Image: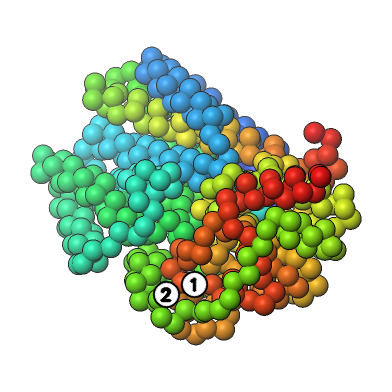
């Protein structure tokens, strides 16, 4: 039953994703990519939850490695997207700089 | 489900809602920055509530978070805007590898999986592995560390097919006996195959097709996260992964449509290698070239009422975005209407040109899309093509034998005058000569794009 429920969530999220992304103008495709990249760093949640105090040594090693990569993805992804979006300005705003 | 787990899952619902809001606000440049921050807030919330769960080993978490966080921040603030495609490729790869490791860790701790769960662990590890090495190859190609050319060799499809069949065979054995040492052995085999397949599947794709590849890898990194979510039954991973997966697929579709090629054609044809040897020498368009000096171009631009810049990958290579903006400002002071016409696949990733011009402070309301400029192209006085080639090649409209026939282009040849900035007469990525260069209304202005435009700026100021 659990699997059916998760699949249900998955299918709805896919449809929602299609709807949302189709509305993004091509001007913003690069920031969109790096933002969605940052979101895909959500594996960090799984990596954190896998690091239990009773985890055996090798599992702790794998968990730490996953935390490192996922954190690069999350922190780097959001920071670089913010840096890019800061640069998008309208005409009057652009002149003031 | 106890109260703590219930609270955590409730917080995940809020996070998912914040991600969705964030993506929705990305649909306009005015709200996009706030949208990104809202999405980051959703991530922060999910991380904090996950850390509140009992029994976590914080020393490893702090260590991993500190290392990853500092690398991520350092990279994000150091990277040049022209290097954004390779940066995104690199981050995609990291997303992929963390899904692979997550699936591996979950399997290592609980080897007695049901066949269904084992199959999903396979999907997560396999897609994650392909994403990782595929992204590394894309990164190498984009940063020029390995050849941008498509690498094709005989029997490539057969080898890739064999690799894929090997992966599915190993997966079948692994799913049948995940709990035994045989299952573990085959899981290792699957990891190796996935890493190899990422290399062999991206290496035959050439540099200018990278927008499609990056979009596709972006989608993979989301789907891998999604599959990892099934393995550890965590719904926030599934929702977020599915959103990213869908986003990558939409972008891939847009990119393929903008090149009038199917995804299969991009992935398997080794485009740009075959055509380069067959087409160019004998039957390409011929004619007289009219070179122009900086002074000539200055007089043409000075007299124009409307000017449209058409940037391509050459702009990024020459880092010419700032001088182009300077020239644009000078033209505006001269009461010329300035716009920037951007082809969807110009550059090396979706929206590459827009980001570069935004970096140079070009206001986003001056950036126009291909479909908006083409209908009024006849009224444009001067089109300045900077380092673009295939996306302005009229052969895509009228030459049925051309490899790019049917691809939508920016129809610069219909403008009253076209000025093409180019380093030499070498053909572009598709390996075909461009009839635009020989047109009656075309002037060729040879040289490095940045130096050429600086010369024009100097002419305007003198």
- Labels 1 & 2 near each other (Cβ < 8 A): yes
Residue B51 appears in view: no
* Residue located 23% across and 63% down the image: B153
Quarter of the figure with the C terminus of chain B: top right
Q: Chain of mark 2?
A: B
Q: Residue furthest top?
A: B59
Nearest the viewer among B114 and B33 is: B33
Q: Label 2 belongs to which residue?
A: B280
**Dot 1, how many residues are within 10 Å of its Cα: few (below 14), some (14-19), or many (20+)?**
many
Q: Do the residues at discs 1 and 2 belong to one chain? A: yes
Q: Earlier in the sequence, mark 1 or mark 2?
A: 2
Q: Secondary structure at mark 2?
A: helix
* Residue located 18% across and 42% down the image: B188
Q: Secondary structure at mark 1?
A: loop
Q: With respect to residue B248, does A80 lie above or below?
A: above
* Side of A95 relative to B206 (left or right): right
* Residue located 16% across and 41% down the image: B184
State the mark number for residue B433: 1
Q: With respect to residue B280, does B65 lie above or below?
A: above
């Amino acid at each position: 039953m659990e699997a059916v429920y998760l699949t249900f969530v998955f299918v709805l999220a896919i449809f929602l994703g299609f709807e949302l992304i189709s509305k993004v103008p091509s001007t913003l495709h690069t920031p969109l990519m790096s933002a969605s990249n940052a979101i895909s760093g959500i594996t960090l949640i799984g990596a954190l939850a896998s690091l239990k105090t009773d985890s055996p040594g090798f599992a702790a090693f794998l968990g730490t490695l996953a935390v490192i990569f996922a954190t690069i993805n999350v922190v780097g992804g959001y920071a670089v997207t913010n840096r890019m979006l800061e640069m998008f300005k309208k005409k009057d705003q652009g002149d003031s700089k | 489900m106890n109260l703590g787990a219930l609270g955590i899952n409730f917080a995940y619902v809020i996070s998912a809602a914040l991600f969705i809001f964030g993506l929705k606000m990305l649909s306009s440049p005015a709200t996009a920055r706030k949208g990104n921050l809202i999405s980051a807030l959703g991530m922060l919330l999910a991380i904090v509530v996950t850390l509140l769960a009992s029994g976590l080993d914080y020393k490893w978490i702090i260590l991993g978070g500190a290392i990853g966080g500092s690398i991520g921040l350092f990279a994000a603030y150091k990277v040049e805007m022209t290097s954004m495609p390779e940066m995104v490729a690199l981050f995609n790869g990291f997303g992929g590898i963390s899904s692979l490791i997550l699936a591996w860790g979950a399997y290592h701790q609980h080897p007695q999986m049901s066949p269904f769960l084992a199959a999903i662990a396979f999907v997560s590890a396999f897609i994650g592995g392909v994403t990782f090495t595929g992204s590394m190859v894309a990164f190498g190609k984009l940063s020029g560390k390995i050849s941008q050319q498509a690498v094709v060799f005989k029997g490539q499809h057969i080898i890739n097919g064999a690799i894929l069949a090997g992966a599915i065979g190993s997966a079948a054995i692994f799913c049948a006996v995940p709990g035994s040492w045989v299952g573990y052995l085959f899981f290792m085999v699957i990891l190796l195959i996935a890493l190899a397949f990422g290399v062999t599947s991206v290496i035959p794709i050439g540099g200018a097709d990278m927008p499609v590849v990056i979009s596709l890898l972006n989608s993979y990194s989301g789907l891998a996260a999604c599959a990892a979510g099934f393995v550890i039954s965590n719904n926030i991973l599934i929702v977020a992964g599915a959103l990213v997966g869908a986003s990558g697929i939409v972008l891939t579709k847009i990119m393929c449509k903008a090149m009038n090629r199917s995804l299969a054609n991009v992935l398997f044809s080794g485009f740009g290698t075959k055509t380069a040897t067959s087409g160019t020498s004998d039957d390409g368009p011929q004619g007289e070239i009219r070179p122009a000096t900086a002074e000539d171009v200055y007089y043409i631009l000075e007299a124009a009422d409307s000017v449209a810049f058409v940037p391509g990958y050459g702009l990024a290579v020459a880092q010419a975005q700032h001088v182009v903006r300077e020239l644009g400002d000078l033209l505006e002071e001269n009461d010329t209407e300035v716009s920037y016409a951007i082809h969807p696949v110009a550059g090396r990733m979706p929206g590459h040109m827009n980001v570069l011009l935004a970096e140079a402070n070009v206001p986003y309301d001056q950036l126009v899309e291909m479909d908006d400029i083409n209908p009024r192209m006849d009224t444009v006085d001067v089109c300045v093509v900077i380092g673009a080639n295939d996306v302005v090649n009229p052969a895509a409209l009228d030459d049925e034998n051309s490899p790019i026939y049917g691809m939508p282009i920016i129809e610069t040849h219909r403008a009253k005058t076209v000025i093409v900035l180019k380093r030499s007469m070498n053909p572009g990525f598709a390996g075909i000569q461009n009839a635009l260069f020989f047109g009656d209304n075309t002037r060729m202005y040879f040289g490095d794009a940045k130096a050429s435009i600086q010369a024009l700026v100097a002419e305007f100021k003198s």
